[in-house]
Image (cartoon, rainbow, N blue to C red):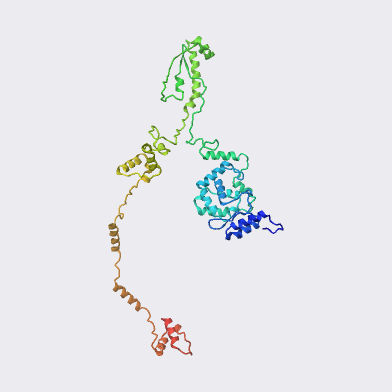
């Protein structure tokens, strides 16, 4: 306890003694140091390698919050999420998603957790430092453990764990605004596959497009033929369904008898033309109006139709007009699976789910699969079948061809020397070497050999006694 003249409370002493007895003997020294600094840690946590994981320093977390390696995993999982939020007031949806990631051990959380759990003193770093480290990393770093550990060692630096810098909070994408919770919920909804305005791509083919266009209120294109009869062929030609086959009957060039109420709706143009039906002035007036309306409708008729959006799931069956690659790329079950399910659900489960019933192969089945792959799925041919490669001409295919090549090569080499030839060469070479001096059986013979040595090998000084041992040493050096 700090020596400050105050006696610690009894509850604190009891808590310390209880923690001290529960701590391993090797960690009790660290426990005492942490308590002496004022850090009331409940245990000394260590990494898998045995290093101290920390946890005694004051950080930006709640003082009553017990930070462990398990809570570190939750923070790592939240840092891997793409949305921005208040890292100190965690939204409930973000926290639940993080717990799910930890439970399922999804990537990249799994790789980040393994690397950070092995870092000594990792629990001493602030939450902002952990978030900034993960969110500033390259998204592909977690594929390479060595590169990831090097990145952590180089960038996990912090001086004040209790008060993170503005740069760290910015890198952690900390957003303390009130709408952070709503934004996080929108991001999670988009991640679940729901359509969220402003986040989801409206052009994605997976969204089902429904026709919501409102009917136009443009006047119908009619042509006054005369005598109260109108031609609607221009209307049918400018309609969006012109040229398509439909079940209901379609009519063109239908003559409609003019009613009394039509005189009032036609307006002044029709009334003015009643006196000049014989001259055809009224027909010209209506034709000009129809031509102007037709020109206005030209852009609508020339608009390109949107591309067909195929569903992602097909029920078993036959579909006409559906491309083969679309049908096979969609999710669903095959007709074979439907037949097996009709036989027995237990048989379906054993064959298609548990895979305990192995498909019996036969030449007929293999040929059918081959024809199916060649005709409908040629891109899967190499993955499902072993195609025999073409052997190049002159390649070694058997042991006989390989032996034949070796024998021909050996025959082209020069003949090897015989034992007699090698012996003669050795004797000829040895004859050119200088002969060794004999040591001699007596002192006189040794002295005679010593006198024949070159001067640089006669090591005995003049005037000294020439002992047999000294002379033999000089002779051995020369030899």
Q: Residue at x 44, y 22 (%)?
A: 237
Residue 352 in sight from this viewpoint: yes
Q: Residue at x 49, y 26 (%)?
A: 300
- Residue that protrudes farthest toward the right in the picture: 5
User: At which x and y percent is residue 355?
Assistant: 39, 44
Where residue 449 sits, quadrant-wise, is: bottom left
Classify residue 365 as left or right of residue 456: left
User: At which x and y percent is residue 180?
Assistant: 60, 40
Q: Residue at x 31, y 73 (%)?
A: 422
User: At which x and y percent is residue 372?
Assistant: 34, 40
Where residue 268 sits, quadrant-wise, is: top right
User: At which x and y percent is residue 395?
Assistant: 31, 54
Classify residue 434 as left or right of residue 86: left
Classify residue 312 as left or right of residue 102: left
Q: Is residue 11 shown above or below 215? A: below
Numbered disc total: 0
Q: Is residue 314 shown above or below 425? A: above
Where residue 384 sits, quadrant-wise, is: top left
- Residue that protrudes farthest toward the top in the picture: 275
Residue 135 in sight from this viewpoint: no
């Amino acid at each position: 306890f700090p020596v400050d003249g105050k006696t610690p409370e009894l509850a604190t002493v009891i808590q310390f003694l209880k923690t001290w007895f529960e701590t391993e003997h090797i960690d009790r020294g660290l426990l005492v140091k942490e308590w002496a600094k004022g850090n009331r840690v409940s245990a000394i946590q260590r990494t898998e390698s045995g290093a101290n994981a920390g946890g005694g320093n004051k950080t930006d977390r709640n003082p009553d919050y017990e930070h462990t390696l398990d809570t570190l995993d939750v923070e790592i999982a939240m840092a891997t999420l793409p949305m921005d939020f208040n890292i100190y007031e965690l939204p409930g949806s973000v926290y639940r998603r993080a717990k799910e990631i930890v439970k399922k051990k999804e990537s990249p959380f799994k790789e980040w957790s393994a690397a950070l759990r092995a870092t000594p003193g990792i629990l001493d770093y602030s939450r902002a430092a952990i978030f900034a480290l993960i969110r500033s990393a390259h998204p592909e770093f977690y594929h390479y453990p060595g590169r990831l550990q090097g990145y952590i060692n180089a960038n996990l630096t912090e001086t004040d764990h209790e008060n993170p810098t503005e740069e760290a909070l910015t890198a952690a994408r900390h957003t303390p605004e009130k709408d952070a919770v709503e934004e996080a919920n929108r991001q999670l909804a988009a991640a679940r596959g729901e359509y969220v305005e402003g986040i989801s791509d409206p052009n994605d083919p997976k969204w089902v497009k429904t026709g919501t266009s409102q009917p136009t209120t443009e006047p119908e294109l009619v042509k006054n033929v005369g005598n109260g009869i109108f031609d609607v062929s221009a209307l049918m030609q400018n309609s969006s369904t012109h040229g398509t086959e439909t079940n209901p009957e379609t009519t063109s060039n239908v003559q409609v008898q003019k009613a009394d109420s039509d005189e009032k709706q036609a307006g002044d143009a029709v009334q003015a033309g009643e006196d000049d039906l014989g001259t055809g002035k009224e027909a010209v007036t209506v034709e000009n109006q129809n031509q102007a309306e037709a020109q206005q409708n030209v852009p609508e008729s020339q608009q390109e139709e949107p591309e067909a959006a195929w569903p992602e799931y097909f029920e078993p069956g036959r579909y006409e007009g559906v491309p083969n690659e679309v049908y096979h790329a969609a999710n669903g079950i095959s007709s074979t699976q439907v037949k097996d399910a009709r036989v027995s659900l237990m048989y379906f489960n054993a064959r298609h789910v548990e895979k305990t019933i192995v498909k019996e192969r036969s030449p007929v089945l293999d040929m059918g699969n081959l024809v199916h792959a060649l005709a409908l799925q040629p891109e899967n041919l190499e993955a499902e079948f072993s195609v025999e490669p073409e052997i190049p001409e002159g390649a070694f295919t058997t042991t006989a061809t390989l032996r034949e090549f070796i024998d021909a090569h050996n025959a082209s080499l020069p003949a090897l020397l015989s034992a007699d030839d090698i012996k003669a060469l050795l004797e000829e070479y040895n004859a050119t070497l200088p002969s060794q001096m004999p040591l001699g059986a007596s002192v006189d013979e040794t002295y005679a050999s010593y006198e024949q040595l070159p001067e640089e090998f006669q090591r005995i000084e003049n005037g000294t006694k020439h002992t047999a041992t000294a002379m033999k040493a000089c002779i051995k050096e020369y030899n």
